[in-house]
Amino acid sequence: MKAFEEKETAKAITTFNEVSAINKISAITVDNGTVHIYTKNLYVQDDRTGKYHDIGTFHIQIGMINSTYDVDNTVRIYNTKYTGMGMNNGFQAPHVFEDGHACHGNLATGMIEAYRQRNLFDLVYQILIFLQSANTGDTAGQYINTWPEVPESVALSTEEEDKFKIEISETEKKFDAVLAEAIPIHVATPA
């Protein structure tokens, strides 16, 4: 029994680290059998206009206790940046209803299989792909244009932190090196 526990614990830690490493994830926690995932800002391109829209940041809740995937309850998605967008000003994302349940469309099979195998990485990855797309031929997806428009450079940026990047001149780098040499470092010596 102990070997099984250790194997499952190692698997859970690996999965947690893999999901945390997805560049669109800002945080992940687990509480009472529910995995809580928080995303960075997500964007969707409107295929009709080619324009990009800021659809916000999300809190994704995945109930991992059940043995089967319930399309209405296992995954709930809540927009933490915008409310009252999309069709009838009542959607969390282009294909996510006001109460947080998703209209899975053709992703349901893959999500169900990932859940059945307890493959959290694949499940989260599929949810992120789902959130970053809008089927504009669909009644709900056609309202992607109600979310704020953003420049392509913002939507396609690989790092949100790029906007805070500061260029340092060679003179400043040399000064920093001299300053670093001048700062005393206390090293504890054994008694």
Image (tube, grey):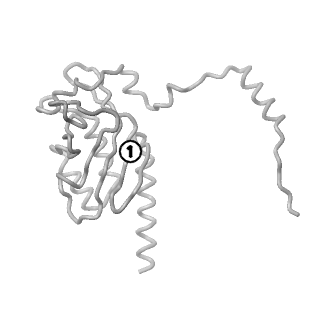
Q: Nearer the viewer, residue 65 or 166?
A: 65
**Residue 59 at x, y percent in the picture:** 34, 44
Q: Amino acid at mark 1?
A: Tyr
**Residue 14 at x, y percent in the picture:** 44, 58
Q: How many marks?
A: 1
**Residue 171 at x, y percent in the picture:** 74, 20
Residue that appears at 30% across and 38% down = 79
Is 188 placed left or right of 131 in the picture? right
Which residue in the structure is indicated by mark 1? Answer: 38
Q: Residues within 10 Å of mark 1 (few under 14, many from 20)?
A: many
Quarter of the image with the C terminus is bottom right
Is 27 placed left or right of 33 in the picture? right
Is 162 placed left or right of 142 in the picture? right
Residue that appears at 30% across and 23% down = 148
Residue that appears at 38% across and 41% down = 39
Q: Which quadrant of the figure has residue 54? A: top left
Q: Nearer the viewer, residue 101 or 153?
A: 101
Residue that appears at 28% across and 20% down = 51
> Looking at the image, is 32 positioned above or below residue 183?
below
Q: Residue furthest bottom?
A: 1
> Looking at the image, is 99 positioned above or below residue 188?
above
Quarter of the image with the N terminus is bottom left
Q: Which quadrant of the figure has residue 29? A: bottom left
Q: Nearer the viewer, residue 61 or 123?
A: 61
Q: Secondary structure at mark 1?
A: strand
**Residue 21 at x, y percent in the picture:** 45, 47
Is 178 placed left or right of 112 in the picture? right
